[in-house]
Image (cartoon, grey):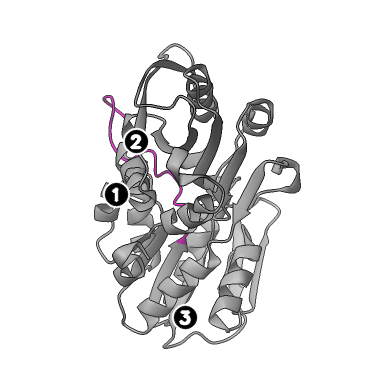
Amino acid sequence: MSGRAHPELADAVSRELDCELVPTSAYDFANDEIYVRFSESVRGTFAFCLQSHTTPINQWIMEHLIMCDALKRASARSITAIAPFYGYARQDKKHRGREPISARLMADLFATAGADRLMSVDLHTAQIQGFFNGPVDHLWALPTLANYVRTRVDRSRLTIVSPDAGRVRLADQWSDRLGAPLAIIHKRRDPTVANKVRVHELVGEVAGRTCVIVDDMIDTASTIVEAAEALRKNGASQVIVAATHAVLSGPAVDRLTRSGIAEVVVTDTLPIEDEKRFDRLTVLSIAPLIARAIREVFDDGSVTSLFDGNS
C-alpha cells in the first residue's frame, strides 16, 4: 500500500513485484487532519506500507504513521514501514544541550503506530538502525548509481571525491567499487550563516581528472557546489555529482544549473517535480531495489544478500 507522497514510486515497485497496490482512500479534512482507510481486508497479511517523506514532510510522515496504525487495527500479520527517504535522519545526535534526537523519536513513533520493521535507502548515518527495536533493512543505492557512472566516464582518469569528512566512508566504498583513487575536501561551516560552507583544502590528486562527488543527499546544494568549485580551481577536467536523495530545497536547482557540474545523478527515492528538473539531471529508478528487498523479506530470505559481492 502507498501513501499520497510519491505514488509513482509505489506503482513502479508494484510493477516490479507483479502485484496490485491495495486500494486506499486518503484525504484531508478541512482542518488538515488526515483520514486513511484501506478498501479491502488486510487481516493476516504481510503489509508493506510505502511513503516517501518529502515536502511537506510533516504531513507525509503523519500519513505514514496513520497508515501503519490502520493496518495494526485491521489485524495485519506483519507491518513493514518503507521510507525510501527517512525524515529527520540528520537529527541523529545532540550537538549542543537542550537539542532533540528527532531520528530516534521517529523510530519510536513508527513502533507505537504498529510497524514491526523499517526499510529505508541510504540512511544519513548507520546508527539510526539502532534506534528502532526491531529489524531495519538499510538498502544501498550505491550499486545503482555506480553502475550508471561506470558507463559515463573513463575509469583510468576517474577520482571519487568526498565533499566533507562525514562522507569519507561512502566515498571509500565508491572507490573500491570503481577502482578509482579517493580525494577529500576539508570544509568548515560558517557558524554565523545557515547553510554557508567555506572550503579549506583538498586532499588528493584531481588535476586533469574526472571527479565524481558522492553524497547521500542534495538539499540546498551549497556543499556540492562549493566542492565542485574547489575541484575546478584545482584543475579537475570534469565534475559529476552522484547522490541518493534529491531533496533540492530552496535555491538548489538554481545553484546546480549555474554551476559547472557536468551531470547530477540521483535516484527517485523522493518525487522530483517538473520545475526542479534540468538538462543535466539524471534520475535513476530505485524501484527494482526496493522490490527485491520486499521479496526477500516476504520469502524469509536475506536482504543483505542483495549487496553481497557488491552486486
User: Farthest residue in the right direction?
Assistant: 275
Residue 174 x, y percent position in the rendering: 37, 47
Q: Amino acid at mark 3?
A: Ala
Residue receiving disc 1? 126
* Element class at badge 3: loop
Viewer can see residue 49: no
Tag 2: amino acid: Leu
Picture residue at 42% right of the left edge, 14% below the top: 190
Circle 2 sits on which residue? 182
Q: Position of residue 310 (x, y in %)?
A: 34, 61
Circle 1: residue type: Ala
Find numbered disc 1 in the image and state the secondary structure of the residue it sits on: helix
Residue depicted at x 37% and y 78%: 296
Q: Please tell me which of labels 2 and 1 falls first in the chain.
A: 1
Mark 1 surroundings: few (<14), some (14-19) or many (≥20) residues within 10 A: few
The label nearer to you, 2 versus 1, is 2
**Which numbered marker is on residue 202?**
none
Q: Report the Cα–Cα distance between label 3 and label 1.
A: 32 Å
Residue drawn at 34 percent across, 68 percent down: 117
The quarter of the picture where the N terminus appears is bottom right
- Return the mark for residue 74: 3
Near mark 2 (Cα within 10 A), the count class, few <14, some 14-19 or many ≥20, is many
Q: Is residue 180 within the magenta segment?
A: no
For the residues labelled 2 and 1, the Cα–Cα distance comes to 22 Å
Q: Please state if 171 lies on the left or on the right of 23 as rendered.
A: left
Nearer-N-terminus badge (3/1)? 3
Residue at 65%, 51% in the rendered image: 32
Image height of 311 relative to 99, above or below: below
**What is the x, y in percent for residue 164?**
37, 29
Residue range in magenta is 83-100
- 3 vs 1, front mark: 1
Our reading of the magenta stretch's main secondary structure is loop
